[in-house]
Image (cartoon, rainbow, N blue to C red):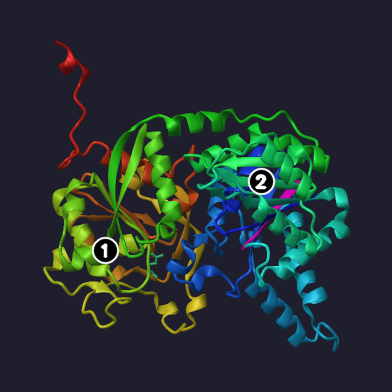
């Protein structure tokens, strides 16, 4: 039977709960314990798929096509597992399931209430993931902050679990912030005491408290929290701010969190082996020469909107012993003031995914710049559509080619909806989502990158390359190097006469792992690192320094 670890957050949001959960998973996995992870999001949206990236950051897509919170991306990257729709639960899902049951008459005329109906539905999600994943430990992150109105049913369900599956099989971990007062040079524990009180009020006594802080946490402070919050001393674990998120598992392991969890849940565990992580963090902390990448997107003001893209670039740069310096270019600025200064110094240009017309012309200009100046270009989903539109404009000598998403009456709809998609209007349900197979054309840059002819990558889009234009664009030098098994959908395209201009209809950023970068990202950085631009001088050969 699975054990459950519930992780709650106190004092403030964005305290680092997601990374803590991912790190607990990493620590347990390093002891050969199988884990799965679930995120509970208290909002009423059924999933974040229809939310603006400004509201929610990136939408992370699982292999089975669930549109989920970006924390799932961190779980996958840290623990190196592939999660499914079962790992993402929102209040919206829970309520719509309960109401659907009520409409079907499943409750036989009873009054439907938060307790027990909603909480039972929530607990079924916990147990379903445990059964399906067969993980020894299921770690569940309760989104939001303790005390939020929306989070209450989730906390109540978490509380009931201790009774349902046995006291020794459930662990409650509370992650809090210890603020620092400059005037007295003190780290304060009172907000933590209050948030633990709030937890206790609803019947949850935390077993472990993880204390986030930008400052050192003294033994005295730990003792105080232990006393006031009634947790063992060794279970008050400091987590100071570190320079890379990948260091968090090492810090928590060092503080004894792994052994503590093993003891409390009575798990059989192998000896911990964190050597790979140590190696990784050592590499990340080694100063490396930068590769300058311009990311031309529409949501660049909110870096979280491209979380996985940024991580995948870092993984790829690390592989090449480089560091990635990202220059965020709001695509609209290229449309209006035509300021190309960032593009001029970039060694590679990346156009990520996105929806809607805003900023599209700026992205197209960036693609023109990359094509004409032979700068490595990498397009992700929308970035591929932009590359196709740009190339078609060049080939047809017209500004008209477009995606019908942006101009429904264009005479050259080079990107278009598939016939079968045309009638569907409900925007929530028309997307191509999750893993699809893709055959790579031998000898292409894509095939060389992957080193295999069949790959599975994750999708999230409505529009497709319009086959009507395939011949003409291929004759002009575009290579459709990745195709669906029936050959009908173009999944990857690249330019023959260009050092590295490659784009995919799928989102390769979701499968990148710190020690195993996605092959397209890896080769994009591989191409970019050898480009020398304005202000980016090649390093002097050592021999030139000899007198
Ligand atoms: N808006 C485009 C489409 O729906 C691209 C989507 C994306 O980049 N994820 O096809």
Q: Residue furthest front?
A: 184
Pointer 1 local density, CA inside 10 Å: few below 14, some 14–19, many at least 20: many
Query: Is 186 situated left or right of 169 in this image?
Result: left
Q: Is residue 3 magenta?
A: no
Mark 1 or mark 2, earlier in chain:
2
Q: Quadrant of ligand 1?
A: bottom left
Q: Is residue 56 visible?
A: yes
Helix, strand or loop: magenta stretch: strand
Q: Quadrant of residue 530?
A: top left
Q: Quadrant of residue 237?
A: top right
Q: Position of residue 434 (x, y in %)?
A: 52, 61
State the residue in front, 208 or 317: 208
Q: Nearer the viewer, mark 1 or mark 2?
A: 2
Which residue is rendered at x = 73% and y = 78% of the image?
A: 98
- Distance between the alpha carbons at the discs numbered 1 and 2: 40 Å
**Label 2: which secondary element:** strand
Which residue is rendered at x = 61% and y = 43% of the image?
A: 23
Q: Residue furthest left?
A: 397
Query: Is 184 situated left or right of 193 in this image?
Result: left
Q: Is residue 347 above or below residue 361?
A: above
Q: Position of residue 152 (x, y in %)?
A: 72, 69
Which residue is rendered at x = 17% and y = 40% of the image?
A: 535
The residue under label 2 is 210
Q: Position of residue 176 (x, y in %)?
A: 64, 52
Q: Position of residue 375 (x, y in %)?
A: 20, 47
Q: Quadrant of residue 275?
A: top right
**Which mark, residue 331?**
1
State the residue in front, 328 or 75: 328
Which residue is rendered at x = 66% and y = 46% of the image?
A: 210
Q: Which residues are magenta?
A: 136-144
**Label 1: which secondary element:** helix
């Amino acid at each position: 039977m699975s054990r459950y670890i519930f992780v709650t957050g106190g004092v403030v949001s964005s305290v680092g709960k997601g990374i803590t959960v991912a790190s607990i998973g990493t620590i347990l996995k390093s002891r050969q314990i199988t884990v799965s992870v679930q995120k509970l999001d208290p909002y009423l949206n059924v999933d974040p798929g229809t939310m603006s990236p400004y509201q929610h950051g990136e939408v992370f897509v699982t292999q089975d096509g669930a549109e989920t919170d970006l924390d799932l991306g961190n779980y996958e990257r840290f623990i190196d597992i592939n999660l499914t729709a079962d790992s993402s639960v929102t209040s919206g899902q829970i309520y719509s399931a309960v109401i659907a049951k009520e409409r079907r008459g499943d409750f036989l005329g009873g009054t439907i209430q938060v307790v027990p109906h909603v909480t039972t539905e929530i607990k079924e999600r916990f147990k379903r993931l445990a059964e399906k994943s067969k993980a020894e430990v299921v770690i569940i992150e309760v989104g939001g902050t303790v005390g939020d109105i929306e989070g209450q049913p989730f906390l109540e369900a978490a509380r009931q679990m201790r009774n349902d599956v046995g006291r020794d099989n459930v662990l409650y971990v509370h992650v809090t912030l210890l603020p620092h007062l400059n005037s007295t040079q003190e780290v304060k524990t009172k907000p933590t005491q209050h948030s633990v009180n709030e937890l206790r009020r609803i019947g949850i006594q935390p077993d472990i408290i993880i204390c986030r802080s930008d400052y050192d946490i003294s033994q005295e402070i730990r003792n105080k929290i232990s006393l006031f919050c009634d947790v063992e001393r060794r279970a008050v674990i400091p987590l100071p701010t570190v320079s890379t998120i990948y260091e968090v598992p090492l810090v928590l392991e060092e503080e004894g969190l792994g052994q503590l969890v093993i003891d409390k849940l009575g798990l059989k565990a192998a000896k911990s082996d964190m050597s790979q992580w140590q190696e990784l963090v050592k590499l990340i902390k080694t100063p490396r020469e930068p590769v300058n990448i311009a990311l031309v997107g529409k949501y660049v003001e909110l870096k979280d909107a491209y979380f996985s893209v940024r991580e995948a670039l870092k993984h790829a740069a690390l592989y090449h012993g480089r560091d990635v310096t990202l220059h965020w270019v709001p695509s609209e600025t290229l449309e209006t003031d035509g300021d190309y200064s960032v593009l001029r110094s970039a060694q590679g240009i990346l156009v990520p995914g996105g929806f809607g017309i805003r900023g599209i012309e700026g992205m197209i200009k960036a693609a023109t710049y990359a094509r004409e100046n032979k700068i490595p270009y990498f397009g992700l989903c929308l970035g591929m559509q932009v590359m196709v539109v740009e190339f078609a404009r060049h080939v047809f000598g017209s500004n008209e080619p477009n995606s019908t998403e942006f101009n429904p009456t264009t005479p050259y709809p080079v990107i278009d909806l598939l016939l079968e998609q045309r009638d569907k209007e409900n925007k929530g349900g028309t997307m191509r989502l999750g893993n699809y197979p893709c055959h790579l054309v031998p000898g292409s840059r894509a095939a060389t990158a992957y080193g295999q002819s069949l790959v599975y990558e994750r999708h999230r889009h409505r529009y497709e390359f319009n086959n009507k234009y395939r011949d003409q664009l291929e004759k002009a030098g575009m290579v459709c190097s990745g195709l669906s098994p029936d050959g009908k959908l173009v999944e990857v395209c690249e330019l023959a006469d260009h050092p590295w201009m490659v784009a995919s209809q799928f989102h390769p950023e979701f499968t990148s792992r710190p020690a195993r970068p996605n092959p397209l990202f890896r080769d994009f950085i591989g191409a970019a690192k050898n480009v020398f631009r304005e202000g980016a001088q090649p390093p002097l050969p050592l021999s030139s320094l000899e007198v």
